[in-house]
Amino acid sequence: MNRLTIIGDEKQAGVDFDPSSGNLKLSGRSIPEDSVDFFGPIIEWVKLYGEDPQPKTVVDVYLEYFNTSSAKLILDIFKEVEHIHSSGKSKVVIRWKHDKGDLDIMEAGKDYSIIVAVPFEVVEVAEEDNDARF
């Protein structure tokens, strides 16, 4: 299985899903022209990864902004990750990162944590903590 890498820009999130390490990273802004077109291959990649995942899978999400259509498709990614977790094939954790004081993104993470049956951490990141950014 190949690594999935998408360079982010002002409208689409950056993606770095590494099947060899089990680290799945999504970051930046997500306001693509066609959210289904953007997220469809990502969701398919996660489905394929779920057939033979690493023993531990870490999903890091660090979005500064996302629109409503992206929110639904991010949930679809989380639901696929939930299937991986519930299958027992991989210990999964989702780490939802937000900048200090960004209450909207923090609340979105808390909302997802209620919906998805996967260990879920909402993590505040200080602006000067460059190691937390990816």
Image: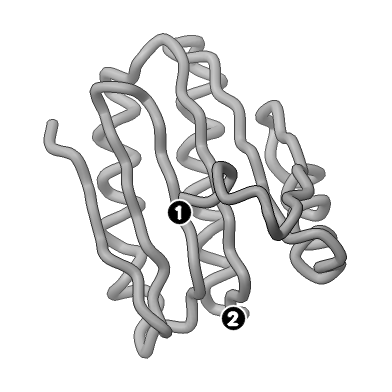
Task: Tell me the residue that label 2 is attached to.
Answer: 67
Most distant residue in the front direction: 128
Q: Is residue 78 left or right of residue 21?
A: right
Against 118, residue 106 (above or below) is below
Query: Where is residue 39 shown, x and y percent of the image?
Result: 36, 65
Rendering quarter of residue 47: top left
Rendering quarter of residue 41: bottom left
Within 10 angstroms of label 2, few (less than 14), some, or many (20 or more) residues?
few
**Residue 9 circle label:** none
- Tag 1: amino acid: Leu
Within 10 angstroms of label 1, few (less than 14), some, or many (20 or more) residues?
many
Q: Which of marks 1 and 2 is nearer the N terminus?
A: 1
Against 22, residue 95 (above or below) is below
At numbered mark 1, what does the secondary structure look like: helix, strand or loop? strand
Against 95, residue 50 (above or below) is above
Q: Is residue 116 left or right of residue 104?
A: left
At numbered mark 2, what does the secondary structure look like: helix, strand or loop? loop
Judging depth in this view, the residue of 106 and 49 nearest the camera is 106
- Tag 2: amino acid: Asn
Q: Distance between the residues labelled 1 and 2?
A: 15 Å
Q: Which residue is drawn at 75% across and 43% down?
A: 123
Against 96, residue 104 (above or below) is below
Q: Is residue 116 left or right of residue 27?
A: right
Q: Residue at x 26, y 44 (%)?
A: 45
Q: Residue at x 74, y 35 (%)?
A: 121
Query: Where is residue 30 shown, x and y percent of the image?
Result: 48, 75
Task: Tell me the residue that label 1 is attached to.
Answer: 26
Q: Residue at x 78, y 49 (%)?
A: 124
Which quadrant, please, contains the N terminus? top left
Query: Where is residue 95 shown, x and y percent of the image?
Result: 64, 39
Query: Where is residue 67 shown, x and y percent of the image?
Result: 59, 81
